[in-house]
Amino acid sequence: GARRGFDGAEALELEGWRHVYSGKVRDLYEPADAEPGRSETLLVVASDRISAYDHVLAPPIPDKGAILTQLTLWWFERLAEGCNGAAASPFEHHVVSTDVPEAVAGRAMVVKRLDMFPVECIARGYLTGSGLAEYRESGAVTGLPLPSGLVDGSRLDPAIFTPSAKAEVGEHDENITFEQMAERVGDEAAARLRHLTLDLYTRAEAIAREAGIILADTKVEFGVDPTTGQIVLGDEVLTPDSSRFWDADDVEPGRAPASFDKQFVRDWLTSEASGWDRASGGEPPALPADVVAKTRARYVEAYEKLTGRTFTP
Ligand code: ATP
Ligand code: MG
């Protein structure tokens, strides 16, 4: 299909791999010896690019790609735990190996190529962001009515499933109802994806809470393994880019905490100092060095708090 995203002009040349796609953050490659579009595997390289307000910003955040990749790998392992004894983990994931070209070591993984569902699966355990905006307009989020009187940062217990349609590049992903999702992926897959997403959120929320982090919401993407027909977890999972992490000490109803990672970037971009007029649609100015450094520190902090490991570049 049509390629969304960047032209990949800045994607590295990697021996043995052919560049096929670049999103806002990741560069995808397929084995150079495979027929284009038909390989069994892909190489997913997480860049250090950061986006905010639908713009990719400059300069990149050092080590961000490695942090996203290491955190994703850690979560894939954690999600598979606790499923022993029973059948296989419900969270079969797409990672095949981390044996990747030296130039992208630590920030890339070889994955099974999946037929991705054209929806983003979002679970929300707290009301904020686009969910809150929709609730204020209609009292519901993606068609799910919620009790009245909820405020920014209100807990949603049980968590709710609020799918969105993957938008073309430069456009916002659009919240859709469960019924609209079912029209896109079929009733059976829609029900399965909702179940998996809420189950994943519940497990991850508990793990994060133990580490002092509130997982307010998260977005995951699933695909079908064309060789087995199984629904498999793809993309990245439970990173600061795909989720809202809040400091557990900072949660106060009526005022949702600042986002863990992009707080400094957003604060600076919207400040007088940046001189950027968001409404103009123009490119944002380059981030100052201290904003880059503070943002990097936040990504490292999220990784270290969650995993209990020390991040070594
Ligand atoms: P955006 O720029 O809005 O983030 P994006 O989400 O498409 O666009 P990235 O996240 O940077 O871009 O790139 C990752 C892409 O790879 C996504 O389109 C995602 O759906 C796709 N993807 C992830 N895992 C797999 C997989 N196992 N098989 C096929 N495609 C995958
Ligand atoms: Mg993405």
Image (cartoon, rainbow, N blue to C red):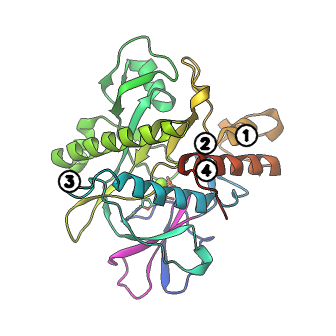
* Quadrant of the rendering where the C terminus is positioned: bottom right
User: Which-is-in-front pick, marks 3 and 1?
Assistant: 3
Q: Secondary structure at mark 3?
A: loop
> For the residue carrying disc 3, how many other residues have a C-alpha within 10 Å: few (<14), some (14-19), or many (20+)?
few
> Is disc 2 in contact with disc 1, using a CB cutoff of under 8 Å?
yes
The residues bearing labels 2 and 1 have C-alpha atoms spaced at a distance of 10 Å
> Where ligand 1 lies, by quadrant?
bottom left
Front residue of 229/178: it is 229
- Type of residue at label 4? Glu
State the separation of the CA atoms marked 1 and 4: 27 Å
Quarter-of-image position of residue 95: bottom left
Q: Amino acid at mark 2?
A: Tyr
Nearest-to-viewer mark from 1 and 4: 4
What span is colored magenta in the figure? 23-46
Q: Earlier in the sequence, mark 3 or mark 1?
A: 3
In the image, taking residue 83 as reference, residue 148 lies left or right, namely right
Residue 24 visible in the current orientation:
no
Q: Which of the two discs, 1 and 4, labels the residue nearer the N terminus?
A: 1
How far separated are the C-alphas under marks 4 and 3? 31 Å
* Residue position for label 3: 86
Residue at horizontal 54 percent and vertical 60 percent from the top: 70
Label located before the other in sequence (2 or 1): 2
Quickly name the residue at label 2: 53
Q: Residue at x 21, y 49 (%)?
A: 189
Q: Which mark identifies residue 269?
A: 1
Badge 1 amino acid: Leu
Secondary structure state at the residue bearing disc 4: helix
Q: What residue is disc 4 on? A: 304
Work out whether mark 4 precedes mark 3 in sequence or the reverse, and give the earlier one. Answer: 3
Q: Position of residue 46 (x, y in %)?
A: 55, 63
Among all residues in the image, which is located at the extreme front? 85
